[in-house]
Amino acid sequence: MFYRESGDFKTSYIQDQQIFPILQDRVFVIAVIAFAFLVVPFLINDYWEKSVLLPVLIWSLAAIGLNILTGYCGQVSLGTGGFMAVGAYASYKFTTAFPELNMFIIVLLSGGVTAMVGVLFGLPSLRIKGFYLAVATLASQFFLIWLFNKVPWFYNYSASGQINAPERFVAGIAVTGPNAPPWATYLFCLILVVVLALIAKNLTRGRFGRSWMAIRDMDIAAEIIGVAPLKAKLSAFSISSFYIGIAGALFFLVYLGAVEPTEAFGIDKSFLVLFMIIIGGLGSILGSFIGAAFMFLMPVLIKNILVNGLGWSTDIVAHLIFMIVGGLIMFFLIVEPHGLAQLWRVTKEKLRLWPFPH
Amino acid sequence: MQDIVKEDDILLEVRNISLSFGGVKALEDVSFDIRKGEVRAIIGPNGAGKSSMLNVINGFYHPQEGQIWFNGQLRNRMKPHQVAKLGIARTFQNIALFKGMSTLDNLMTGRYIKMHSNLFAQMIWKGPAQREEIEHRQKVEEIIDFLKIQSIRKTPVGKLPYGMQKRVELGRALAAESKLLLLDEPMAGMNLEEKEDMCRFVLDVNEQFGTTIALIEHDMGVVMDISNRVVVLDYGKKLADGSPDEVRNNAAVIDAYLGVSHD
Ligand SMILES: Nc1ncnc2c1ncn2[C@@H]1O[C@H](COP(=O)(O)OP(=O)(O)OP(=O)(O)O)[C@@H](O)[C@H]1O
Ligand SMILES: [Mg+2]
């Protein structure tokens, strides 16, 4: 086994505080990121872009967002779809109002708008907890979708009530609209996701992250060490919504191109992202990626094998997928609330000590 | 210990505190003070109002009547996190650790009020945030050494045995480097050896760091050993206040502990 920490002793706190303290992990992650930036853009085609890479990247971002709120700060939210819609509609209003504005700035601004909306809908969390908070966020989900359907200003009074992403460019290359090359849309999302994931990791391992986890684990004890619940909860709501809003903006601008709110950002999306973080791992940035990839790709894979390969009927397979997801959710909630990320960590720990488990 | 005390020797004073929950009177006209640098015990039978007193001091409960003076200043109504900033830390009767975090993270969280790097610095990490993190990590490691919990540094606290959890909770309170440390039954449920360790830590904190300590404790032996002065509560009222010896020989206290009827 090469997977060893033996001989890899930490001699300073800096070394001990690294994101991936084990050398092999560090090398592996850097290799993956290098591959994603330097190799994938040359191999990518339409299928990989639309069916695998873009959705996994965008859902990972949404999962990181919800994980900050639910996994780290312990505030359950069923409003993810609604907040994604806020990001999408904000980006639509910005792109149409300021056609010359840089796309990165548009996307970040949309996240900013969503963050403000998130704080607003996070206010009840100061009074209510757990199940009741989940219901309150559910109400915000329905309210937001209703709002985007109802108020024509949001969709610029278009006859269909839909919003359509106009063609926009970064450095002269289209990243939205039907003519955007796959490698460009992919890199556009990849840059945002990598940078934002790193920022999320930094936030969660420092002072802010600890104040969120303190509120999650024992709110009265958090207060006596000086954490103001108002500040901790609302900062979690705003940063979480910032990420979810950006995911929504990318989902609309880059991935779907045209959006009808009920269909694109319905309650099913809220549950989807919640399932991603439960299966991937509550309170883990890495788990957000694993969960998003798993929840999005597992059904595709099963469908490919059973429908295309073995010729099963589509609705049987669809039901089967429901059952598998349901079973997995129950398994992880009961057996391993820290999800696949934790299973991976445990495996690593075993490997590290192998062949002497004690 | 009956000599006259100067005003500025007093760290905290509660005056005429009355607290009730609906019909239940948890505290009735209770006054006492805590001098700088002393170990002050609060004792009394179950339900006497001891924990309620601590909750009043650190801002969880707001008494209907009475005043709280801290460091010579009358304190306005405050929330617990504001009280923490004044320099008051505490532990709980029922352990209130952050179960999902490691020992190290619990202690680092205990330094929350000492850390100031802003959101932007935290996002970047390299630079001010990392420097601050390392500086405070050093402080926390000193506490870890002091409490001899090096071997459980990275263990999630939920997995630790009860006695160790109590010790980590003390560590988290120490991490705040407060002026006043409130300990609610720090030795409850411990075996003799663990109790001795805990007594040692409490005395060392008091002597080495000069921290003023108020502690609630049922074990009279412990109280007699480590406290400078004792205040006794019973049914929400102050029954006695003085040195351990005075309190031990006080007739009313003996009655209360032996369960003699109150009339
Ligand atoms: N939040 C509350 N709501 C209602 N009643 C309360 C509350 N907190 C305390 N009380 C009541 O106040 C009284 C004093 O309780 P307190 O917990 O302060 O006692 P204690 O001296 O700490 O007892 P113990 O030794 O059992 O810990 C009790 O009658 C209790 O039921
Ligand atoms: Mg008590």
Image: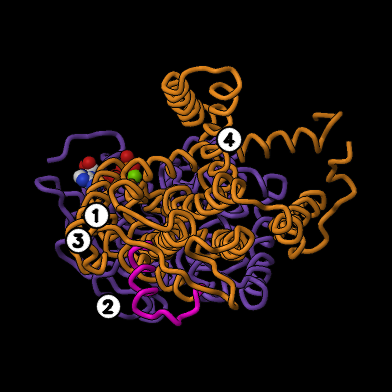
N-term-proximal mark, 3 vs 2: 3
Q: Which residues are magenta?
A: A86-104
Q: Chain of mark 1?
A: A
Quarter location, residue A21? bottom right
- Circles 3 and 2 on the same subunit: yes
N-term-proximal mark, 4 vs 3: 3
In three-dimensional space, the C-alpha distance between marks 3 and 1, rounded to whole angstroms, equals 22 Å
Residue matched to label 4:
B161
Residue matched to label 1:
A127
Q: Which mark is residue B94?
A: none
Q: Name the image quarter holding the N terminus of chain B.
A: bottom left
Q: Nearer the viewer, residue B104 or A234?
A: A234
- Which residue is at 25% across, 66% downward? A154
Residue matched to label 2:
B74
Residue A101, given in percent of the width and then of the height, sits at 45, 81
Q: Are dots 4 and 3 in contact, CB under 8 Å?
A: no
Q: Nearer the viewer, residue B175 or B8?
A: B175
Residue B118, given in percent of the width and then of the height, sits at 51, 76
Instruction: Name the amino acid type tagged 2.
Output: Leu
